[in-house]
Image: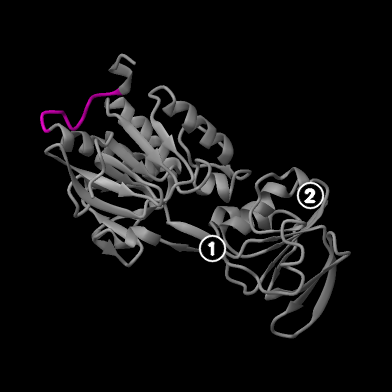
């Protein structure tokens, strides 16, 4: 049964990561009534949940900026247009609905629905969950010395830390904590790393041990906190016991699109929404931007700056969809009266 007298927004952005937050700002710049919806209880996406204490070096105008500070500034930026922000609410369905003779999109949730003329999907990589390490002691000390994410690095001060992993997150945390921790040991189950070359070069220039072909066997402690970790060389079975206060597991995470995969969107490689150069999907008035979007014939470049550009393109195209007389390019913000 259709919703009664729905409150219709010009544009609704699904996902409040950096791309979604900038999309909300730019939609306000285009004079659109804007709503942004996030499944998590806070805005910021991966920056807030996974990497709040990590420095980001490739945001224009910032030699380096903490992820949590970038989120804070993006939220301050959108405040000038006062968009509606809805947190801790997942969109389950996307369907068309007639509203007083106007066909709009209905975004269904467990508790109700949102209505909008256009949609920009900025869901990043979708819902994410860390790859859990099934070793003795890991679950026993989870959040009491064993961590998959770092929300606050203050408890890591002057601690003996074991970092497990070979990707960007593991390497970046080694660099981030090297002058903060008492000691750091990095172990990785093979000798090939998936991290950025520059980060690896910087780590190799430190005194942090990088133990390749080593894995965690178990964590021992006093039933309150970890005290030591037993690690082993996976080719020779040699074992070592090292003192640890904290074990940081950075072995990647699983991501899933969740309900988005069932919305009738044309997909690429089962994880990206296919778009054209204007970030349009196969559904009328529905756009995608950021890590979740991909254009046919191109390789996705999952950078924050790329998401910002795609958000602006999607918003301008959404404005033209709502009002065909509107200019696709509105001019520069420095020429606008805000």
For the record, the magenta segment spans 324-332
Q: Is residue 184 left or right of residue 281?
A: right
Which structural element holds mark 2?
Answer: loop
- Of residues 99 and 310, the one nearer the viewer is 99
Q: Is residue 208 magenta?
A: no
Position in image of residue 178 (x %, y %): 74, 49
Residue at 28% in and 58% down: 263
Residue at 40% in and 25% down: 82
Position in image of residue 4 (x %, y %): 25, 39
Picture quadrant of residue 23: top left
Residue receiving disc 2: 181
Q: Residues within 10 Å of mark 2 (few under 14, many from 20)?
A: some
Q: Main secondary structure of the magenta part?
A: loop
- Let me know if residue 83 appears in the view: yes
Position in image of residue 284 (x %, y %): 17, 48
Residue at 62% in and 52% down: 172
Q: Residues within 10 Å of mark 1 (few under 14, many from 20)?
A: few
Q: Residue furthest top?
A: 337
Q: Is residue 40 left or right of residue 157?
A: left
Picture quadrant of residue 170: bottom right
- Of residues 236 and 202, the one nearer the viewer is 236
- Of residues 187 and 21, the one nearer the viewer is 21
Q: Earlier in the sequence, mark 2 or mark 1?
A: 2
Residue receiving disc 1: 253
Residue at 63% in and 57% down: 171
- Of residues 184 and 24, the one nearer the viewer is 24
């Amino acid at each position: 049964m259709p919703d009664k007298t729905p409150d219709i927004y010009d544009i609704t952005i699904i996902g409040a990561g950096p791309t979604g937050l900038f999309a909300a700002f730019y939609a306000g710049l285009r004079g659109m009534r804007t709503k942004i919806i996030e499944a998590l209880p806070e805005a910021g996406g991966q920056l807030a949940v996974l990497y709040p204490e990590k420095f980001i070096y490739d945001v224009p105008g910032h030699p380096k900026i903490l992820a949590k500070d970038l989120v804070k500034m993006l939220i301050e930026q959108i405040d000038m247009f006062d968009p509606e922000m809805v947190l801790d609410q997942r969109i389950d369905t996307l369907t068309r609905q007639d509203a007083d003779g106007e066909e709009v999109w209905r975004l269904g949730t467990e508790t109700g629905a949102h209505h909008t003329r256009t949609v920009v999907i900025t869901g990043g990589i979708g819902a994410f969950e860390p790859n859990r390490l099934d070793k003795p002691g890991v679950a026993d000390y989870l959040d009491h010395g064993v961590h998959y994410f770092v929300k606050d690095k203050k408890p890591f001060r002057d601690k003996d830390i074991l970092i497990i992993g070979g990707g960007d997150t593991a390497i970046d945390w080694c660099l981030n904590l090297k002058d903060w921790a008492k000691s750091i040991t990095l172990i990785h189950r093979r000798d090939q790393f998936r991290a950025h070359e520059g980060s690896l070069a910087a780590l190799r220039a430190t005194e942090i041990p990088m133990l390749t072909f080593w894995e965690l066997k178990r964590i021992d402690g006093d039933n309150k906190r970890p005290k030591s970790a037993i690690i082993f060389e996976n080719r020779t079975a040699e074992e070592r016991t090292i003192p640890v206060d904290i074990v940081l597991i950075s072995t990647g995470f699983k991501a899933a699109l969740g309900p988005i995969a069932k919305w009738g969107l044309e997909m690429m490689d089962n994880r990206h929404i296919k778009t054209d150069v204007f970030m349009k999907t196969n559904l009328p008035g529905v756009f995608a931007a950021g890590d979740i979007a991909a254009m046919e014939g191109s390789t996705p470049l999952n950078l924050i700056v790329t998401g910002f550009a795609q958000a602006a393109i999607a918003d301008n195209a959404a404005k033209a969809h709502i009002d065909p007389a509107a200019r696709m390019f509105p001019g520069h913000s420095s020429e606008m009266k805000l």
